[in-house]
Image: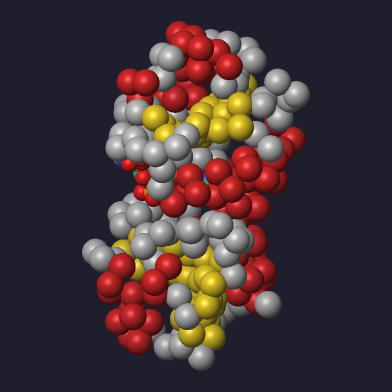
Amino acid sequence: MHLFGLIGQPLTHSFSKRYFTEKFEQLGLTDYRYELFPLASINELPALLQANPSLLGLNVTIPYKKQVLPFLSASFLPEGLNACNCIRIRDSKTEGYNTDVIGFEKSLVPLLKTHHTRAIVLGSGGAAEAVLYVLDKLGIDHLTVSRKAAGNKIINYYDLSDELINSSTLIINTTPLGMFPLEDSLPSLPYELLTDKHLLYDLIYNPAKTAFLRLGEEKGASIKNGEEMLIIQAEESWKIWNA
Ligand code: NAP
């Protein structure tokens, strides 16, 4: 048995099990399985590994991408990036990787125009780490908006000025607001200020068009959901598990 899976909580929104199950079927890998492992706490990870010696790889999702770091035997994360969404398991050792970075970068770059020089990133969790890493790499200036604003380049939602919205034509949602089954929720933004110069990128892929994207589109903004990023990061995880 070759076992792979996803850890997180809750896992109701998971696409990965369906994606990898179909992949294994297409490749004729009859003794491969991908399972969901909802963990009430990341402290349950060692017991999960012990109970499943055939586990070869895990994906990590909300809310454990940062919390999982102390549980890694070795880290292959890009320097300065403190979030892991992919674990390779060999001889009971856990190797941490981040495939969100390549997924976000490859899906964003073709959409960028010359005026996308400043970005607003909504949320400061695990996925935001990958987003900020890519923005730095691309030389796009950025500001994070967090409910618990503190520190350099982080502000609260009520500090978002008209000037900031006007000048930050790339807005990226890394919060779970709008994700199934809470499809009516959305980040608190002055949507009326959005224009056709704005590009709204939502890391959420279910539903395909969140309220955040819908309101942006109504104002003429370009929109992108998280599906392509998801597929790229899944394929990158598959490569790492097979390396
Ligand atoms: P996470 O670590 O829990 O971070 C989410 C962040 O969103 C939190 O740190 C928080 O930031 C903010 N947030 C949470 N609840 C909120 C609320 N009620 N109101 C406002 N802000 C809230 O989760 P994650 O792993 O980064 O994932 C975030 C989202 O991205 C999920 O929807 C996930 O499915 C999606 N995602 C998609 C892909 C893809 O490939 N498409 C990859 C990764 C993640 P503050 O506390 O700073 O406000």
Q: In the image, ligand 1 is in what quadrant?
A: top left
Q: Quadrant of the rendered structure where residue 69 is?
A: bottom left
What residue is rendered at 68% in x and 45% in y?
137
58 with respect to 71 (left or right): right
Q: Where in the figure is residue 218, as x and y percent of width and height?
A: 52, 12
Numbered marks: total: 0
What residue is rendered at 57% in x and 64% in y?
77
Relative height, residue 46 to residue 13 (above, below): below
Question: Seen from this angle, which residue lies furthest front?
Answer: 152
Q: Is residue 190 visible?
A: yes
Q: Where in the figure is residue 128, as x and y percent of width and height?
A: 48, 45
Question: Seen from this angle, which residue lies furthest left?
Answer: 40
What residue is rendered at 38% in x and 82% in y?
49
Relative height, residue 167 to residue 44 (above, below): above
Q: Is residue 204 visible?
A: no
115 with respect to 142 (left or right): right
